[in-house]
Image (tube, rainbow, N blue to C red):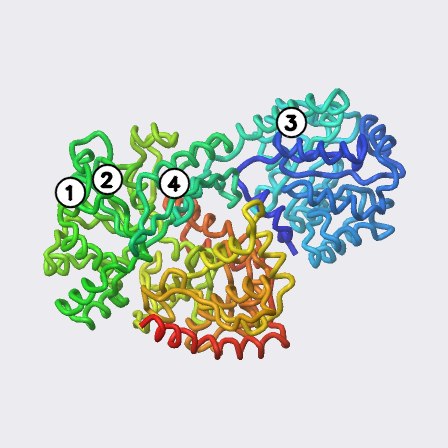
Amino acid sequence: MKEIVSRRDREAVHSSRKLVAGYFVAGYPDRDTFFKILREAEEKGIDIFEIGFPAKNPTADGPVIRDAMKKAAPGIEDDLEFWKKIRETVHGPVWLMGYREDLVAGGRYRTFAAAGCYDGLVVPDIEETEGRALQDEMKAYGVDVIGFIGPHSLLIDSANCIARFPIIYQMLYSGKTGQTAGNEDFRDIMALAKKESDTHLFAGFGISTPERVGELLDSGFDGVIIGTAIIRHLNQSREEMGRFIESLRKTADAHSTAGAVLAADVGTTAVKVAMVDTGSRILAEASRDVTLYQENGHIEQEPREWYDAFCQAAREVLRKSGEKPEGIAFSGQMQDLILLPGTGNAPEGSDAGMAAAGDASGNAASPDSCGRAILYSDARAGKQAGDIRAAIGDGEVTGVTGNLCDGAIPFAKLLWLKEEEPDRLAKAGAVVFSAKDYIIWRLTGQRVTDVVTASTSGLMDIRKRGWRADWMEKMGLDPGLLPRLAYPTEAAGRVTAAGEGASGIPEGTTVYAGIGDAGAATLASGISAPGEYNINLGTSGWVAAVSGGAPENRGYFNLAFPAPGRYINTVPFYNAGIVHKWVSGIAASDEENRYAVASRLLAESRPGSHGVLFLPYLQGERYPVSDADIRGGYVGISPETTKADLVRAALEGVAYSIRSGFADPGAIRTISLIGGGAREKVWCQIFADVLDHEVMVFRNSGYMPTLAVAAIARVGGGKMSSLDEFIREVRASRDCDVYRPDPEAVPVMREGFARFRKLYPALRAVED
């Protein structure tokens, strides 16, 4: 067996940066100070925490560590809460280091592992056979046993260790701390490790200066383990320890492999930016909220606000990470209609860029856009969609695009602008269909959209992946407005001087075409075969699957897969996380955290919400009904109805609505949840009960789409072979919680779903 089983270990050693592991004596200098020291050390740059377990005979350690062992807080050997708190205090991996007599013989290592206290186990005096047995045992706990090679190990013993253990502690020498070991002392072992590309070698013992750290990292070590020197500086002061760790971190960063990329998502509520290294580790992140305008049935946003939010978040991420990205990729809300001014590609400073001054609707148009963007959920163009179907043919439009033509389609909205706001349309030199396309234009001057996003425009041949310019002409629209089509991993352009001035991202940085948010979520969910489904719980939501055949429209949405020959089949819902946000706000007072209040109420709730049903159509709906005018409502409220019932009924209503998107629930092989809503555990259980199927929820589901976007930049930059490689990594990680149907709740939810299906027709009759 040779695999890294701890998620934290895997994320750390697979990153592009050289690692600094710090050794700290458990409970030294006292319990309270110890935890403050750990937090400060992580802030200053420690990646991995090696915690020294109290030793009866620490004769193998130097005098500084022996003295710390004697002074450390007593009685912590069996204090489980103390060891749990270590794991809760820091984000990086925790390695438990102790001798066989103290840690293994009494079984303490097993007790702590079962409680999730640590990620790696270091036992320097264990025999090889026992070490292998320990490695097999620890796999069940998700704990790595760190291989240990001493300075006098035989080469054959070292080779066996390298062949067995993916992470190895290479002790440089034995003797007085501070003694120097030359490269020749570990040259043969390093050569063996290099042959094993999946071996990660750490140098330890006697490394006392940043200069020595640099020498070892230059020699090929993946990281260093510093102990005595950290404790010596700590004995002077915590501030001195912090300065020393900062110097180590600076040295390690200077020797790290480049390759970090910037990944950004432009959503309806916020713009999020993250710096991601080659090991899919998020080095820094930031977000900025954006405003949603809902007036007179129209749903819009201001493009300039997207760009300003992105630039602010990007500058924060650049500052926090200290990295210069090798590339940038975006995901973003799709099916928007965004008009760019002028006839050229230059977003700032050109005559074209300054052409627009206002629009017929009265919206102030910035010189960098022609009014507000019309969002995906805005279905104002129902009449124009009918005109398109009549002129081109309903079957033709559906057959070519793979999708229905309705009032939310950008093609229909373009026609709406021609008829309702012709002056505004006349000022446009280009149109793009995703919020991220607008930011790309501002950064690079290039008008580009990706094939996934273009699938939602109503104008792309989903099989040939080309524009139907003839349709534009037939409806009296200029086909020259359409942007260049690209696959997500293709370069859209490079950051201009103006782009650098606004965002801080260096001029010349490659910006990739990126991907629509549904595409990013599909990649992040790891689905790739029929019967595998993913539910995304963002502000809006969808169910997604992947198919290899030509798409047939059955009332759901078909998207081009990010690679040729495949398709993403989605059932979109306008109402998902927005319902969670709304009902949480109703339940909480102004001073309270809305989601914390909702979680407490949900913990008190019962399946079925005591008969209360909620139709979750706060902003109209697209599926299971296509009705822009319908609104939500509660049914079944009585004097006994509680807040908990109202909150749970709202979330059950969303689950019922999404359950309607499954034509044949019996065909489900696997189903996963991703997105911000998946953080609410009761909601995850509701889905398992409503679908009567186990549901996988990725533990870092909020970050998975970000990692998918980063993978797009890596593939584009030649650092990853294909997006399928990323999908395989997601599937192999299995880093998820599994929610299984509750046998008592399933029949209750089945009855609730049967009632729910009658609710829309009844409420629609009232609206009519």
Which residue is under mark 1? 427
Cα separation between marks 3 and 1:
57 Å
Q: Considering only vertical position in the picture, is 750 above or below 308?
A: below
Question: Local crowd at mark 2 within 10 Å, few (<14), some, or many (≥20)?
Answer: some
Q: On screen, 264 above or below 205? A: below
**Residues marked 2 and 3 touching at CB (< 8 Å):** no
| Residue 302 shows in the view | yes
* Quadrant where the image shows the N terminus: bottom right
Residue at disc 4, secondary structure: strand
**Image quadrant where residue 370 sits:** top left
Image quarter (top left, top right, bottom left or bottom right) of the C terminus: bottom left
- Disc 3 to disc 4, how far (Cα)? 30 Å
> Which of marks 3 and 2 precedes in the sequence?
3
Looking at numbered disc 3 in the image, what kind of residue is underneath it? Ile
Mark 3 or mark 4, which has the lower sequence index? Answer: 3
Horizontal side, residue 135 vs residue 457: left or right: right
**Foreground residue among 166 and 241:** 241
Q: Residue at x 32, y 64 (%)?
A: 628
Q: How crowded is mark 1: few (under 14 residues within 10 Å), some or many (20 or more)?
A: many
Identify the element where label 2 is drawn: loop
Q: Are marks 2 and 1 in contact (CB under 8 Å)?
A: yes
Q: Where is residue 416 in the image (x, y as percent from the top left)?
A: 18, 56
Residue tagged by mark 2?
365
Q: Is 314 in front, or is 493?
A: 314
Extreme residue toward the front, this view = 639
Residue under pointer 3: 245
Q: Which three-letter amino acid code belongs to the residue tagged 1?
A: Lys
Q: What residue type is labelled 4?
A: Ile
Residue 727 makes an appearance in the image:
no
Ranked by sequence position, the earlier of labels 2 and 1 is 2
